[in-house]
Image (cartoon, helix red, strand yellow):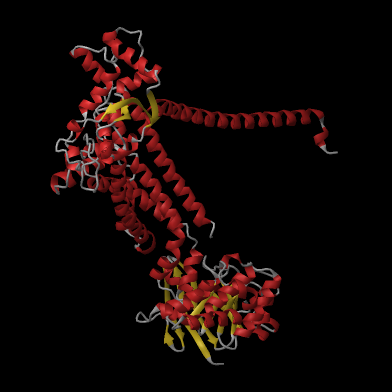
Amino acid sequence: MTSSSDPQRLDRADARLRRRYRAERLFQASGVAAIAFAVGTLFLLLGTVVYQGTGAFVESVAVLPVALDAGALDPDGDRSPESLARGNYASPVREALRARFPEASGRREKRALAGLLSVGAEYDLRDFVLAHPEAIGTTVERPLLLSDDADLYVRGDVDVDVDESDRKVSDAQVAWLDALVARGQVERRFNRRLFTSGDSREPELAGLQGAIRGSFLTLLVTLLLSFPIGVAAALYLEEFAPRNRLTDFVEVNINNLAAVPSIVFGLLGLAVLLNFLGLPRSAPLVGGIVLALMTLPTVIIAGRAALSAVPPSIREAALGVGASHVQAVLHHVLPQALPGILTGTIIGMARALGETAPLLMIGMIAFIVDLPTSPTDPATVLPVQIYLWSDAPERAFQARMGAAIIVLLGFLVVMNGAAVALRRRFESRY
Amino acid sequence: MKTKMQTDGLDVFYGEKQALFGVDLQIGANEVTALIGPSGCGKSTYLRCLNRMNDVVPGCRVSGRVTLDGEDVYDPRLDVVKLRARVGMVFQKPNPFPKSIYENVAYGPRIHGITHDRDELDALVRDSLRRAGLLEEVEDRLNEPGTSLSGGQQQRLCIARAIAVSPEVILMDEPCSALDPIATARVEELIDELRAQFTIVIVTHSMQQAARVSQRTAFFHLGRIVEEGETTKIFTNPDQERTQDYITGRFG
């Protein structure tokens, strides 16, 4: 045995070892605590959003018999779509409700009764009649969309204990809605409108289709600009550019651009694209150009990193069989680097999808009901739509906002998933 | 000896540092010339001057004369792509393209337009693989990735890729250093067979390998050629004491 058998010395070594283990356990525990905190706040955030937003995925309708009177719906009497489109659909809807509650009398009560239903009920009825002109003259059971306040009451979100003047649903309306619910005449169904229609002043009619299209068109412009330009710039800088002060200067500036606050790009768009070049305001074209400028540094930096990660042996192999420099790069280096470049691009695009500030500067914050069909139509985008709805006075918009956030997060998750999938798929080859 | 390549007073600088000092060497046609010497002595640098692979190294400067069949390799009018088609290269670490075995061999002929149709290309690919002694092993999986082969097979694939463009000279930079003894023996055998058609220059750290495969040997030390001559003479009765010390393992 050596001197380590000396008992005092062994004790000291043991104590030191115990201290070391304790310190290591503490280190690991603090790591776990940090992750737990991060995951906790994430779930808290997602939980609130989902709790707030799920209501908007469901809408309430009152199912009532509607008498489709030929005189009101078909002024020309020839059942042509033109004639049917000019018909008066408000009165059959109103009559259906009055027939259900004949006790309502006087102008104020009748107004309150009509207030149960959304104007959307008329539009739905018109769509139904245009699709089924043979139903004119009969009485059909139709779902009539409730107004946002009535919907909130049916959902149980209105406190009836407060004074009548302090709430949006009057005592009479409460009684009518209770009667409808008691007879099973109120149905809750999936809110398709949320995905098929554009923005509206009426919360129950407002949808995300306009914002989704706007986001899509904007990102399309961003992708078409930033991907080819970014890849070309990365290729040239990494593979062909001479190393001198000019290229150093360019490189430093690209790295700095990546850190420029996004609203500055918005100001640039406002000053140059709108005021100087006279491009249309609120258009995805302009938004896309601005976001492309913002995304370019990300694409270039990711592209250069991916290109320099390709092993030099591949380049040498190509040069060794007599490929020119350009051939070696285009045939061998670029295909190897492509998954990395695509990942960088998708992450840049995901950032662009969630960007709000620069788009406010170029007027994409306008209230736009029409669905955009081309990059020059006025449009808004998902994050701006969220901002708009968060600002709206109607309470029902809060749920829409939550739903819009869920949709936006869904798109982001899909895009990031695509980036991961691309990387996995191509990396396994090498 | 018929000279295929020749260097006269070759100096190479990497930035401020000089790597080669006035190297004169003749490389005989249809011979295997081995370059030996301790690490950092400039043998790989010398090899890379022969097909101008040093061009891509930033800060690398070459002076002196390198000729191939009497033509100046560093003539600015000379097309470096054509030069590399004539002087092929096999690297230390097997570096097949991350593509199929077939594509690896077909790439060179394709970019040089050597073949005119698919059948000709197929025949050339198979012939190159056969000459590299690999065809039997990979015949039924030509579409599998070249990276799926073993290290020794990958290196023979790289040799097949080099000979597919019918070069005149093949440069080999320690081609067996990443291979096991069996794969090494296979590649050495192959080098001996290829000598009939090609001029071969091989850099190696293995004295035995140099003795086995080469006809002539050049011993490099500190950027200069200490001694060069017939392999049998260098390994049995060298003129210089330093050569004797190196090949018997007393330094280096």
In this rendering, the count of numbered labels is 0
Residue farthest to the bottom?
B1
**On the rendered structure, is A256 left or right of B63?**
left
Q: Residue at x 48, y 69 (%)?
A: A316
Answer whether residue A183 is visible to the viewer in this image: yes
Q: Residue A404: image x %, image y %?
A: 35, 33
Q: Residue furthest right?
A: A1
The relative height of residue A82 versus residue A164 in the rendered view (above or below) is below
Could you tell whether B225 is left or right of B187 in the image?
left
Image: A303 above or below B80: above
Task: Give how far across and how far down residue B71 sits, in percent.
Answer: 42, 87
Residue A340, horizontal then vertical, whole percent: 44, 54
Query: Which is more toward the observer, A61 or B131?
Result: A61
Q: Residue at x 44, y 63 (%)?
A: A333
For image coordinates 32% across by 39% down, the residue present is: A196
Residues A401 and A280: in front is A401
Q: Quadrant of residue B91?
A: bottom right
Q: Is residue B227 above or below residue A123?
A: below
- Specify whether B157 is left or right of A354: right
Residue in the foreground of this view, choosing between B73 and B161: B161
The answer to which quarter of the image holds residue B176 is bottom right
Residue A381 appears in the picture as rendered:
no
Instruction: Left or right? Give the position of A159 relative to A278.
Output: right
Location of the C terminus of chain A (image quadrant): bottom right
Q: Quadrant of the N terminus of chain A?
A: top right
Percent across and percent down for residue A229 are 31, 56
Q: Quadrant of residue B143?
A: bottom right
